[in-house]
Amino acid sequence: MEKLVYCTENSETELFIGKPWYEIGDHIDISNTIIITDSNIHSIYGDNFPSCPVITIDPGEQTKSITTVESIVEQLLEKGCDRTSFLLGIGGGVICDITGFVASVYMRGVNFGFISTTLLSQVDASTGGKNGVNSGVNKNIIGCINQPSFVICDPEMLKSLPEEEYISGLGELVKHAFIRDAGLLGFIEENIGSILNRDHNLLTTLISASVKIKIDIVTSDEKERGIRRLLNFGHTIGHAVEIELGMKHGFAVSYGMLMAAQISVEMGLLDRNELGRIETVLNKLKLLTDIPQELPDVTEAILKDKKVEKNKIFFVLLEGIGNGVIREIRTDDLVGIIKNKK
Ligand code: ADP
Ligand code: ZN
């Protein structure tokens, strides 16, 4: 088990990686906690939940809406929750995003924590404090930054994850290696078999390494004014193909990372061998199995990206493996580069 603690301006978050999730009683006051989860997780793990009231929502991204927020708020009121209540989200990214958002606004804010049940949320969504819901097709457009009190990541829970959900999470894990840690990439390359087999101890090591990179970046730039933008590696093009083709996040981001690595080569920042290494590891992790033969027109999706400001966007490139760099480029130029690649 690894315990990590990170602090931001007005909070302290404890992360427990490799801790059995059912030891949750160590962290909460059962008499004043409400669990928020989805029906899939409830059917697999519900029997072992602590004896707190449970609010169950439908699984899936379409549930991440203001309507669901209202419904949860009504149920919290019915259950008599007040400012001292604690919200415990048990689930993947969707549950963490909604629980964090509801906790941030209910009675102007109550404390919250997560048991993070997908690889994607363990290495990404549950740390960093971004909470929010979608509005129509606009992802995470209503949200806030607010850190949980604790996050528990138990790799054992990943054994019940559907294969594509698991593989999708590997996309964000390897992203952290690409942008910050060439050593971690080497370690991933040496352990592909055990990674695909979801080996418990190996996952504890990898999730810890990956989360440390994320924490390091987030704590030096909580509000995303500078270095936090590195975490968007692969995401500008990734989000666009995710929207256009309905791909799962980690697969779309992997495709975006490959494109960004190719652009890095064209700009003379990355050499071809390194690009080859990136493509090989993504392939071995089965992250490029679904990629489109031909890139759809992503112009509109890129122009609508909420990160675009005054027709410019901060695009992340690699100046060598393990060294992400941020370049501000005009969206027209970016669209031009992508169109040329088609
Ligand atoms: P993310 O945004 O982290 O990919 P979601 O919250 O959308 O995750 O969860 C993806 C899907 O996996 C949902 O259908 C959810 O119910 C299911 N799920 C989450 N965690 C587990 C788990 N440990 N075992 C089985 N299914 C899970
Ligand atoms: Zn992402």
Image (cartoon, rainbow, N blue to C red):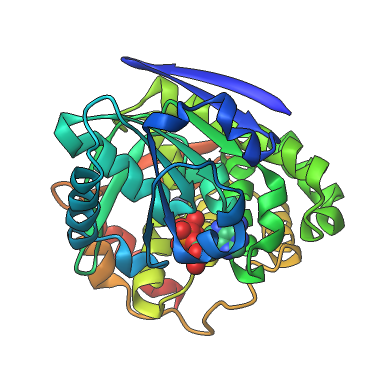
Residue for point 53% across, 45% down: 116
Q: Is residue 66 above or below residue 147?
A: below
Q: Quick check: 249 left or right of 154?
A: left
Residue 51 seen in this snapshot: yes
Q: Quarter holding the C terminus?
A: bottom left
The picture places residue 171, in percent across and down from the top left corner, at 59, 56
Residue for point 43% across, 44% down: 89
Q: Quadrant of residue 88?
A: top left
Name the residue furthest bottom.
293
Q: Is residue 263 above or below residue 115?
A: below
The picture places residue 172, in percent across and down from the top left corner, at 56, 50
Residue for point 27% across, 48% down: 132
Compare residues 111 and 62 and report the one nearer the observer.
111
Q: Quadrant of residue 21?
A: top right
Q: Quick check: 176 left or right of 38?
A: right
Compare residues 337 and 25 and report the one nearer the observer.
25
Q: Is residue 191 above or below residue 332?
A: above
Q: Quarter holding the N terminus?
A: top right
Compare residues 222 and 241 and report the one nearer the observer.
222
Q: How many marks?
A: 0
Residue 254 seen in this snapshot: no
Residue for point 51% across, 28% down: 215
Q: Quick check: 176 left or right of 226?
A: right
The picture places residue 298, in percent across and down from the top left corner, at 32, 73
The picture places residue 267, in percent across and down from the top left corner, at 49, 51
Q: Quadrant of residue 184?
A: top right
